Image: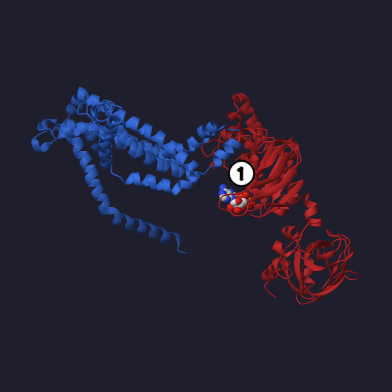
Chain colours: A blue, B red
Amino acid sequence: MRLPTSARLSETTAERLRIAALLAPAVALIVLLFLGGLVSGLLRSLNYFPLIGLDTPNFDAYTAILSDREFLLSFWLTLYISLVSTILSTVLAVAAALLLRAALKGRRVVNVFFSLNLTIPHLVGAVGILYLISQSGLLARAAANLGMIDRPAEFPALVADPLAIGIILTYVWKEVPFIGVIALAILLSVGEDYESVAKSLGAKRWQAFRHVTLPLLAPGVASASFIVFAFTFGAFEIPWLLGRTYPSALPVLAFESYSDVDLGSRPKAMAMAMVIALLSALAIVGYTRLSRRFIRS
Amino acid sequence: MTNVTLSKLTKEFEGKPDPSVDHIDLEIESGKLTALLGPSGCGKTTTMRMIAGLLRPTSGDIKFDGKSIVSIAPERRGAVMVFQNYLLFPYMTIRENVSFGLKMRGVSKTETRQRVGEMLDLVQLPGLEDRMPKQLSGGQQQRVALARALIVQPKVLLLDEPLSNLDAHLRDEMRELIRRLQGELKITTIFVTHDQEEAAVLSDKIALILRGRLQHFGPPEEYFERPASVEIARFFGGVNFIPGAYDGSVIATSIGKFSAPRSSIASGAGVLTIRPEAVEIGGEGANSVPGRVVSHVYAGRYARFLIDVGGIRIEAVSDPKRVSQIADGDSISLRFDPNEIWVLAQPTEGDGVSLGASEGGNGSVASVSGDE
Ligand SMILES: Nc1ncnc2c1ncn2[C@@H]1O[C@H](COP(=O)(O)OP(=O)(O)OP(=O)(O)O)[C@@H](O)[C@H]1O
Ligand SMILES: [Mg+2]
């Protein structure tokens, strides 16, 4: 225990080196795959591909997609889906967490319920939603059988619809538990004493919520929301399954351009992928900022 | 100025067989400082939460100035509670914390600013408005919590163990501050403590609660000079309890007869009690008994001796200089001044209280000095 300072120092340095050495293979793999992929994608989007003689990078692909109506429609659609899904999920998750805290006795049951949902893959959820709400789905048939509509096909289009309701529903279904678990954990760990203080000092219920509960929840929940935004902006499978073909969500469009027979559209596909990466990165920056503040307080 | 009345106040929690607060009746006078005293888990915080409106009583009533307030929401009761762990809002500056109650009431910005300044002066923390709670020491945070409560001019101030998280020096300072503020502002104040000395120093009256039940309510002297039961006497540092037969003026015990004019019972089976500092070491004549020193502790400001008298252990506190004159094993005489003796009723079996004249406090003296 009583080593001289220098010995102790070198011991911790040695320990750090050992940990670094142990982690090195994993880190190398991640860097290679992730950064490697990102960099090669970036170069490709800049029309830089010396192997086939393209050795002067340019922004042609970017100017091309920015003047492409389909890309712009797709971009706004994706932004709309992500924002609406994120906001809806956040609001519902906070409301759910508050209700669940009030019904504290069922806490364990609730946690199981939340976690169960978290383990179901997005794709499975999407298929489930498809079975449920498409015009040939369960709800449509049930409504037809009950005589509410004449034929299942008269059921409102919630899948492949202009408002992307099916996609948003799937995301909300999947992300409410994710944000909810975090919100509930914060509520339970902070306890109700701050709210008691507020009430004792004269705050009405909504004032206590607005000035105490919400600020205590905000940093943690906002971090989770940023993750949800980044995820929904870059996710491919749900809009591919439940979305319209025109305009399609950005990741779908990017993938389709990439797999186009015309190899010349690859730089455009890569440029789109870079746009997605950039927006997701911005969301992650927001997340780290907030979570750092959250940890400090 | 508000007086607070608790009538048969009771709180039962689901899954707990005994009520946490059990039919408490209490009449707290307007403008006074009252202590709720009792060991951990006896229901002090629960009682305060019910008065503040943060917890609904299972049964019973709470009245402010004769009017029942149990169905009034906490924010409209005018009873403000200060919690043991301060609970300053961590994301707000000191100014925002202190002004919270005013903001909820829609008080104007300029008035708020001025009152926050005055309040921080009052608790002796001027100029800290723009700090964050984390940047303050425990004692400073406690003052801010106090300022945050006082700024709304509560009818009733509820302080839950306001001093228990502070070190000894700060605690004295805060005691002073609370005493002074309460004297100036004359707010009816109830404060919780599990420290009998703190209760005695600070309060006009002490309500002693054991196992959710009110044991006694009265000024501090009563607890030290005329405790109502062995259990109460013991809670207030009583250690010498000798059972005997009392005839109204003399108590006959296994170690002799003592004249005892002061008592809580008329006659019958009684218990002689005398505070350690009232036992005269070396005193002779009437009301004295011979004994042998078992062990002693030197505590700087005083010395504490454990003395065996005919198989009964008596504890005596004396001038620390006696330590050089008296050795363990010495035979000495002890005198119980008749006016210092207090005769109590013998506890009945059901109370679960033993006299334990040879264990309890006595045992600790022996173990500290380590030479029995
Ligand atoms: N919300 C609750 N649910 C169940 N039991 C509770 C609850 N709050 C308090 N109790 C129980 O009620 C009893 C009294 O608790 P209380 O907090 O009032 O004690 P206290 O006198 O303030 O103790 P301390 O000095 O440790 O703060 C305890 O046995 C406690 O376990
Ligand atoms: Mg308590």
Where is residue A251, by image quadrant? Answer: top left
Rendered location of residue B343, percent (x, y): 83, 62
Rendered location of residue B226, percent (x, y): 81, 56
Query: Which residue is labeled 1 in the image?
Result: B83
Q: Say if residue A235 shows up in the picture.
A: no
Looking at the rendered structure, the kind of residue marked 1 is: Phe
Rendered location of residue A111, percent (x, y): 41, 47
Q: In this picture, is A232 found above or below B340?
A: above
Where is residue B349, by image quadrant? Answer: bottom right
Q: In this picture, is B268 found above or below A37?
A: below
Q: Is residue A31 left or right of residue B282?
A: left
Chain letter for the residue marked with disc 1 in the picture: B
Residue in the foreground of this view, choosing between A276 and A41: A276
**What secondary structure is marked by label 1?**
loop
Residue under the point 35% across and 39% down = A175
Residue in the foreground of this view, choosing between B150 and A232: A232
